Image: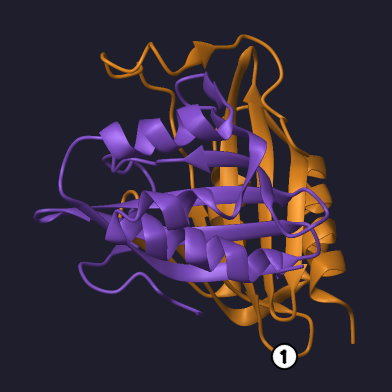
Chain colours: A orange, B purple
Amino acid sequence: MTDLRENVHRFWAAADARDWAAFATPLAEDVVYTLPQTRERISGRERYVRFNREYPGDWHLRIERTVAEGEQVVTWSRCTVGDEEIPALSFFTGDGTGRISAITEFWPEPYDPPAGREHLTERYDGDDRQGT
Amino acid sequence: MTDLRENVHRFWAAADARDWAAFATPLAEDVVYTLPQTRERISGRERYVRFNREYPGDWHLRIERTVAEGEQVVTWSRCTVGDEEIPALSFFTGDGTGRISAITEFWPEPYDPPAGREHLTERYDGDDRQGT
């Protein structure tokens, strides 16, 4: 039995390396991938691996933070495509044997700050890893 | 010394109740709040409490999932304003005594699914709590 956190790290390393056999190994056969922002869901390891294999662009991903507790693991990753970087926030659930049975993922995009709060906020350009 | 997870739950309950004294209690005096999407940062408990107190709208918040590990806690919350619901993903860091010293928060918005992956995905209307 492999630790869920370790399996999640293997999963991300395999994704970044486009090693689809290694990517599939930590996944339960009936894994469910959910994207709440688009209300899309992908059911089953085969489809989910294919979704990632077919995903366009020369994207790369590195983990900024992992928080693991029992059968729950969260990663905050940084996904870069060329000069663009966007965060990915992934909530993993284990199946009780260390395999990943569910992933719910969010891809928050940049937006302009609403007016009227400049008296409380500063803008920053560089590092957003405060407190890590 | 209070557990960080417990303090995070008190913090959210106080926010939902607009109890600003209770909201401030679990925060370190030099707490830093970071919004990577707008690249805004708020420094210090007083400013951060004021930011929340002044935040417009009759919003309500309930926690969908908490994952806690040592000095790191993540919450996935559901924020509703009228009929609209959007998720909030909050990464808390403790100061070593159970107080919250940093919060990095994401507010991912809905978007239309890109074309070309309908052969792998289904759309869902209801519950997105798969695997919880």
Front residue of A10 and B66: B66
Residue B119 visible in rendering: no
Residue type, label 1: Gly
Judged left or right of residue A69, residue B79 is left
Name which quarter of the figure residue A46 lies in: bottom right
Q: Position of residue B19 (x, y in %)?
A: 34, 56
Residue that lies at the very extreme toward the bottom in this rendered image: A96
* Residue at x-position 50% and y-position 31%: B46
Classify B23 as above or below A46.
above
In this picture, residue B4 sits left or right of residue A104: right
Residue at (20, 35) in percent of width and height: B56
Locate residue A130: give its quadrant.
top right
Q: Residue B43: x and y, percent? A: 59, 24
- Quadrant housing residue A124: top right
Frontmost residue, B53 versus B36: B53
* Residue found at x 42% / y 67%: B63
- Left or right: residue B37 versus residue A72 is left
Q: Residue at x 68, y 12 (%)?
A: A126
Residue A36 at x, y = what percent? 36, 57
- In this rendering, the answer to whether B79 lies above or below A128 is below
State the SS at label 1. Answer: loop
Is the residue A101 above or below the residue B26 in the image? below
Q: Residue furthest front?
A: B21
Q: Is residue A76 left or right of residue A18?
A: left
Q: Which residue is mark 1?
A: A96
